[in-house]
Image (tube, rainbow, N blue to C red):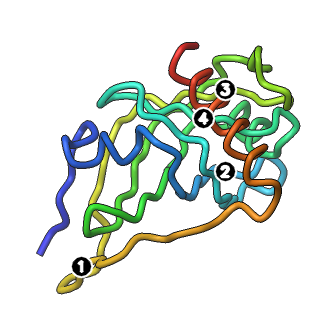
Amino acid sequence: MANRVEATLTDELLPILRKEQYVTLGTTDHENGGPNINAISWVYAQDKKSIRFAVDNRSRIVENIRKSPIVTVTLIGAGSTYAITGNAHILLEKIEGVPLKLALIEIKITEVRDVMFYGARITEGPKYEKIYDKEAAEKLDTQVMEAMKNA
């Protein structure tokens, strides 16, 4: 049975990606051409056709995207696992109003593919907790999410 493929985010996925969410980001390594996978959480779906995310502007992710802009975000949620593929570009080298040196990157979605193996359903998504100052983490998270929405 073929897995479902969409050209944009579904109504079910959009709200999941409008809050801080654990996802993985796959890029092509700029040095060896192999896969490079990173876990990120500052993601925001601007609309059904674009996702923004923030990462340290010295991150390997930034250089990888400069060399090869096709990326895949893997989302575990809404009862399944989704590979969201698109073309990424750097919107801002440094997000203003945030105390860290973060780059803002936007992905123009080309495909949303349900990649869950047949006969299974995700019953609970991945959970994580911040292990540093919770008050500082909440303040930073709010600043970053607002900056991504408003850029």
Q: Is residue 110 above or below residue 93?
A: below
Secondary structure found at label 1 = loop
Q: Residues within 10 Å of mark 4 (few under 14, many from 20)?
A: some
Residue on which the image places disc 1: 121
Judged from this view, the residue extending furthest toward the left is: 1
Residue on which the image places disc 2: 28
The C terminus sits in image quarter: top right
In primary-sequence order, the first of circles 2 and 4 is 2
**Residue 37 spot, x, y in % from top left:** 66, 61
Dividing the picture into quadrants, the one containing residue 132 is: bottom right
Amino acid beneath label 3: Leu
In primary-sequence order, the first of circles 3 and 2 is 2
Dividing the picture into quadrants, the one containing residue 120 is: bottom left
- Residue depicted at x 29% and y 31%: 48
Q: CA distance from mark 2 to mark 4?
A: 8 Å
In primary-sequence order, the first of circles 3 and 4 is 4
Q: CA distance from mark 1 to mark 4?
A: 31 Å
Secondary structure found at label 4 = loop
Judged from this view, the residue extending furthest toward the bottom is: 119
Q: Is residue 142 above or below residue 17?
A: above
Secondary structure found at label 2 = strand
Locate residue 55 relative to residue 91 in the image: left or right: right
Q: CA distance from mark 3 to mark 2?
A: 18 Å
**Residue 126 spot, x, y in % from top left:** 49, 71
Nearest the eye: 91 or 130: 130
Residue on which the image places disc 4: 69
Nearest the eye: 144 or 137: 137
In primary-sequence order, the first of circles 1 and 4 is 4
In primary-sequence order, the first of circles 1 and 3 is 3
Amino acid beneath label 2: Thr
Q: Is residue 10 above or below residue 75?
A: above
Disc sitting over residue 104 in the figure: 3
